[in-house]
Image: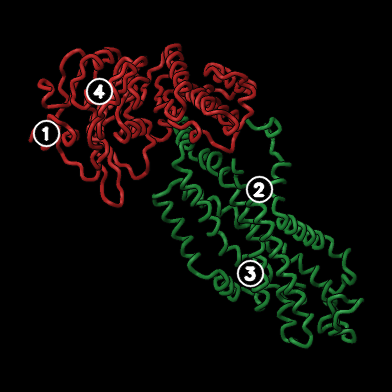
Amino acid sequence: MRRATSHGRFDYRKSWHKFSRNYLSVVGLGVVLLVAFLAIFASYVTLYPSHAEFYVNFPEAREPPNWAHLFGTDQFGRDVLTRIVFGFRYSLMMAIVVLSLVVAPGVVLGLVAGYYRGGKVDMAIMRTADIFLAVPPLVLALSICSVLTPSVFNAMMAVSLMWWPWYTRLVYSIASSLRNEAFVQAAEIAGASPFHIIFREILPNCLGPILTKMTLDAGWVILIGASLSFVGLGAQPPTPDLGTMVSDGAKLLPEQWWISIFPALTIVLVILGFNLLGDGVRDMFSAETV
Amino acid sequence: MAEQLLEVNDLCVNYKVYEGLLRVLNGVSLSVGSKEKVGIIGESGCGKTTTMKAVMRILATNAVVPSGTIAYKSNDLLKLGRQELMRLHRTSMSMIFQDPTAALNPVFKVGEQLKDIVRYSEFTSNAPTKQEVKTKAVELLKSAALPEPERILDSYPFQLSGGMRQRVCIAMSLASAKDLLIADEPGTSLDVTIEDQIMRLLKQIVEDRGLSVILISHSIGAVKGFVTKLYVMYAGTMVEEAPTDELFSNPVHPYTQNLLKAVPKLTGGGVPEGIAGRIPSYLTIGDGCRFASRCRSAKESCHVHAPPAFDIGNGHRVACFHYGDI
């Protein structure tokens, strides 16, 4: 018998214990929280907020890292560190917008296909998902973006359009195996409607993997967004986007290396943070070995 | 004869699989009168659960029902629409599963699951208040002989023992089983003392509430003191049907005779020999008597034609050509 403390509500202390057993998860959480904090308060924590917009100061252009500009300045004399911190805003916005557009429809489609496994509905949904999955994600996003006018908004739409099948497939695999569990049959013979079975019996049992995937995906979405910006199909100058900054600075390599290397390193840091966090979330939802 | 509540007639169920067609149920008939207690026995894999799933209409999606009828209270269950079926499930019939751990949703507290059922089963016309639902849920748990019902409602399934979980499942099925309760080996996954408690509880509840019950088991001892009529299944067919006492004193079908001999006795005599062989593959099964390959008395003709059920009086029916000689 478990202790009475685990009765009733969600046990935060136990979840934290499982999450923090791997200290790297805590590091990941720290990175993500730091990035989020910097992004939200970018105007207050940076030294040169005006550098995030259209700003030119050629006398100070291409200065290597120094005490006034820790990461140096770019070809227009803008502070690289300031622009990186503002760039976090676009990265996080990308992740948040894409995931909130993608998760709900992807999950619902997966649940429906899993519930009606083997039928025409399953066929229609899963084969459509397969078609999307057959094309490499970056290629699909690139081709959509190149048709539309390049902008942050269009990049988000393109990434969303190719991302939902991953959720559909994840949820489908869980839902179709839960479909034949005795508790689902027990609900059926108690006269539960398909709606009830899908959303009240099956969905809650899928939440752990969905949340884990969302955390891991945040990093990947940011990477794809940065890739689109890098090839000029995402955020447009003077928007301080990490991908755009890398591509701007790439022309000046290797002499003015700080202009591209620092934004590139922060992309690595953010993705690493989300991945470590995702591992922790997965540990949190994994059943404890009894 | 009492008024019939459930009447299954000549039911066949096949499963489509990659290798071909599994012909599992072949002409199963059974009837349950109102307030009658009926048992079905047979070894593992002989189609007991499939029959009950067909009655409950929860067969897997690759199952096909080529022929047969299931009549329940003047409804044809196999042709019933979704809404009608849902109404019957909510208000008239229910089933207890073999494994209570699998039958409870692991992520919800017992209270949430039980109250959901109560809300739709006990209050069909009016929307009940939270308090009404809770009172009813507590009442159900008490009738399943669970102590501290308030605490049980606030527990997750994993916090309860196996016996408690099965009692919870019984309480849940009682909410919607107003006429028919199907118990699919309710004690098999529990240890023997708990199994005995569960069986006693079930018997008492069924008698108190005047329910019809179908008890499925492969343990002959468990059904003997419980049911009044017994069906013996073998490889998807009903081989014998008789009132319980009659079946035990005068088993006619060779399978039933061997099945009864296979029970170990406390009074000694060593381990019984059992029945040689195993259930034939449903994939390659022929048209003859399905027991013929294991039957010591089988003749040529047994392998060619399936025997119909012969009525030999006293409500005793047997599906064997040579029932008189064995």
Q: CA distance from mark 1 to mark 2?
A: 61 Å
Q: Is residue A154 above or below residue A33?
A: below
Q: CA distance from mark 4 to mark 2?
A: 54 Å
Which three-letter amino acid code belongs to the residue tagged 3?
Ile
Few, some or many residues within 10 Å of mark 2 (<14, 14–19, 20+): many
Q: Are marks 4 and 2 on the same chain?
A: no
Which three-letter amino acid code belongs to the residue tagged 4?
Lys
From the image, tell me which residue sits under label 4: B261
Q: Is residue B17 left or right of residue A119?
A: left
For numbered disc 3, what is the local secondary structure?
helix
**Residue B175 place in picture, x, y as percent:** 50, 22
**Residue A169 place in picture, x, y as percent:** 51, 56
Task: Return the chain for callout 4.
Answer: B
From the image, tell me which residue sits under label 1: B302
Q: Are marks 4 and 1 on the same chain?
A: yes
Residue B278 visible at all: yes
**Residue B252 place in picture, x, y as percent:** 18, 20
For numbered disc 4, what is the local secondary structure?
helix
Which three-letter amino acid code belongs to the residue tagged 1?
Cys
Depth-wise, is mark 4 or mark 2 nearer the camera?
4
Q: Is residue A59 left or right of residue A217?
A: right
Q: Are marks 3 and 1 on the same chain?
A: no
Q: CA distance from mark 3 to mark 1?
A: 70 Å
Few, some or many residues within 10 Å of mark 3 (<14, 14–19, 20+): many
Query: Residue at (77%, 57%) from the top-left corner?
Result: A30
Q: CA distance from mark 3 to mark 4?
A: 71 Å
Per the rendering, the mark at residue A122 is: none
Per the rendering, the mark at residue A284 is: 2
